[in-house]
């Protein structure tokens, strides 16, 4: 199976309303994580590996 065939088989179109509601649910959880001590440490470690983003 080619990569194009595999992509075509696994591609799913989702309604925009579903994607928006999922984003509205997920965004505050991501913010909460990065405001936590664990999230701040994770981000600090990530920045050390990717200094071009600091």
Image: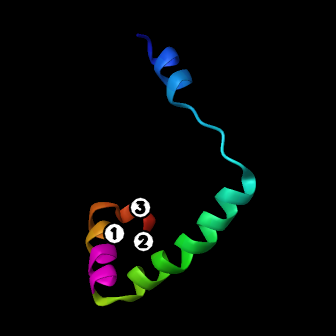
Residue at image coords 27%, 83%: 38
Residue plotted at (35% across, 64% down): 51
Residue denoted by label 1: 47
Q: Position of residue 36 (x, y in %)?
A: 35, 88
Say which residue label 3 marks: 52
Closer to us: mark 1 or mark 3?
1
Q: Is label 3 in a helix, a strand or a loop? A: helix
Sequence order check, earlier mark of 1 and 2: 1
Question: Viewer-proximal residue, 16 or 36?
Answer: 16
Q: Residue at x 46, y 20 (%)?
A: 6
Q: Please tell me whether residue 21 belongs to the stretch shown in magenta.
A: no
- Image height of 9 relative to 43, above or below: above
Circle 3 crowding by C-alpha within 10 Å: few under 14, some 14–19, many from 20: few
Q: Which class describes the residues within 10 Å of circle 1: few (<14), some (14-19), or many (20+)?
A: few
Asked which quadrant contains residue 41, the reply is bottom left
Let me know if residue 41 is in the magenta part: yes
Q: Position of residue 50 (x, y in %)?
A: 34, 61
Q: Contact, CB < 8 Å: mark 3 with mark 2?
A: yes
Marks 3/2: CA distance? 6 Å
Q: Is residue 50 above or below residue 12?
A: below
* Tag 1 and tag 2, C-beta contact below 8 Å: yes
- Marks 1/3 in contact by CB < 8 Å: the verdict is no
- Residue 54: quarter of image: bottom left
Q: Secondary structure at mark 1?
A: helix
In the depicted structure, whether residue 10 falls above or below residue 5? below
The relative height of residue 41 versus residue 46 in the rendered view (above or below) is: below
Tell me which numbered mark, 1 or 3, is placed earlier along the sequence.
1
Q: Which mark is residue 54?
A: 2
């Amino acid at each position: 199976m080619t990569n194009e065939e595999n992509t075509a088989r696994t591609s799913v179109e989702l309604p925009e309303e579903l994607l928006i509601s999922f984003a509205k649910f997920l965004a505050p959880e991501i913010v909460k994580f990065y405001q936590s001590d664990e999230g701040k440490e994770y981000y600090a470690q990530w920045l050390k590996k990717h200094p071009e983003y600091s």
